[in-house]
Image (cartoon, helix red, strand yellow):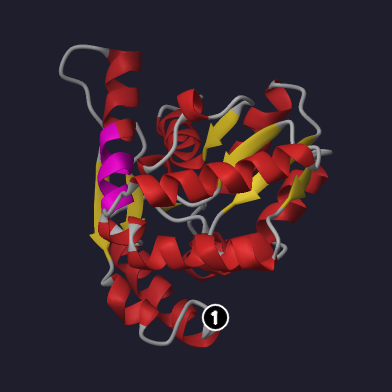
Amino acid sequence: MKKLGLLGGLSWVSTIDYYRYINEGINARLGGLQFAECVIYSLNFGELQTHGWDDWERTHSILLRGCMHLKAAGAEALVLCANTAHALADEMQSATQLPVIHIADATAKEISSKALKTVGFLGTKFTMELAFFHDKLRASGIESLVPDFDDRTFVQHTLRNELGCGIVTPQTKHGYLDIIDRLIARGAEGIVLGCTEIPLLLSQSDVAVPVFDTTRIHSRAAVDYALGV
């Protein structure tokens, strides 16, 4: 089994889910008392948020510091436990010389398995507006639709001030479901929960079309990598 390095704290709420899903996944495959061999480095998310993700030079420095700690601890592959962090996935892989298990590659594979061609995409404003995730989907023949400006602003605000702190409210859930309805009306055949905190709020039972939980998808890809599948 390969040792996984989990870069967490982005936020800590979803890092807990990663740790659980990866260990459950290993145990489901191997049984008994077999669990994941992994190392977690949990960043202080507030350090990133002081200037925002889009101070990319500073963000690069903070993420790389965590990744290098994971490498020093013996990690053989990196799991960046946040969609937005994958804007710098190539840079982390190059600097550490460790493979990064890419969340967008895993998600594209999952969507393709359902034979869908157009999906709605929810995430941080950076993940919705930058190309790094959408380009991975497009390379697999999948188009991604993002909400309009006001809806993107709503999603960003709730991710930063509510879900990232583990706060879930019925009002926010209703707002997300309205946004999803608008994406479906525009032609979305499925919905990508492209921030690792959104599954705290929504699940497949809430949505009429297929939902792609990137936290679970990424965790399954990490299990596959660890076991050499």
Residue 59 visible in image: yes
The residue singled out by tag 1 in the image is 54
Up the image or down, 227 lies above or below 12; here it is above
| 15 horizontally vs 99: left or right | left
Q: Is residue 76 visible?
A: no
Q: Looking at numbered disc 1 in the image, what kind of residue is underneath it?
A: Asp
Q: In the structure shown, which secondary structural element does the residue marked by tag 1 occupy? A: loop
Of the 4 image quadrants, the one containing the N terminus is top left
The correct choice, above or below, for 63 with respect to 82 in the image is below
14 magenta-colored? yes
Left or right side of 182 for 38: left
User: What residue span does the magenta drawing correspond to?
Assistant: 13-20
Q: Between residues 166 and 6, which one lies in front from this camera angle?
A: 166
Residue that appears at 76% across and 28% down: 116
The mark tally for this picture is 1
Residue 211 appears at what percent x and percent y? 57, 31
Instruction: Return the x and y of residue 209 as percentages of the image width and height.
Output: 64, 26
